[in-house]
Amino acid sequence: MFRKVREVGPVFLGTHQPRLDDKGRLFLPAKYREELAEGLVITKGQERCLYVFPVEEFQRLTEALRTAPVTAKAVRDYSRVFFASASDETPDKQGRITIPPSLRQYAGLERDCVVIGANTRLEIWDARAWETYLAEQEPAFADLSEEVLPGVL
């Protein structure tokens, strides 16, 4: 019999294709609205996408960065961009969030978007950028499992 070692937050899966409206709002995938109803944090992610964290996960990351050595330049640089670009949002009654203009510009979001589940976060991509990224990464995906998850798969 297995015992839970620690409480695990939501795991986000799948690919969704919402559209950004003229006011910069995006519908969250319906299956995740309950987990994100109390609030979320949007910030810059790698590869010019946006990261969307439930508040609890963002707090966990904040604590990890808080305990990282401030004497390390990479930690300072990452923290500055990560936190300076972060925006806390609460979805409206229809499950929409407003993406601030600076984050829309960073990710190149105009109309067609892709929201992907990425384990403990969602990522928001411009649809064309996601297609390009996926086309570049899928060929190597099958060969990576051993290096990424040795002995697991």
Image (spheres, rainbow, N blue to C red):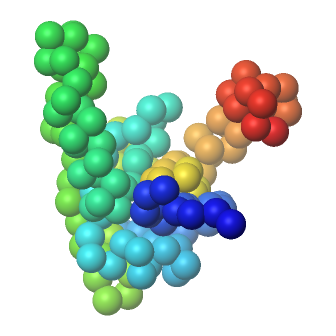
Q: Is residue 100 left or right of residue 143?
A: left
Residue 94 to residue 105: above or below: below
Residue 32, given in percent of the width and then of the height, sits at 49, 74
Instruction: Name the residue at 26% across, 70% down.
Output: 39
Q: Is residue 40 left or right of residue 50?
A: left
Residue 46, given in percent of the width and then of the height, sits at 45, 32
Q: Nearer the viewer, residue 107 or 77?
A: 77
Residue 104, given in percent of the width and then of the height, sits at 35, 49
Residue 138, given in percent of the width and then of the height, sits at 79, 35
Residue 22 to residue 138: above or below: below
Q: Is residue 23 left or right of residue 87?
A: right
Quadrant, the N terminus: bottom right
Residue 148 to residue 22: above or below: above
Instruction: Name the residue at 34% across, 40% down.
Output: 44
Instruction: Name the residue at 23% across, 32% down.
Output: 65
Determine the image quadrant of residue 133. Answer: top right
Instruction: Name the residue at 84% across, 26% down.
Output: 143
Quadrant, the C terminus: top right
For the view shown, which residue lies furthest in the bottom direction?
93
Residue 70 to residue 49: above or below: above
Res. 44 in view:
yes
Total number of numbered discs in the rendering: 0
Res. 100 in view:
no
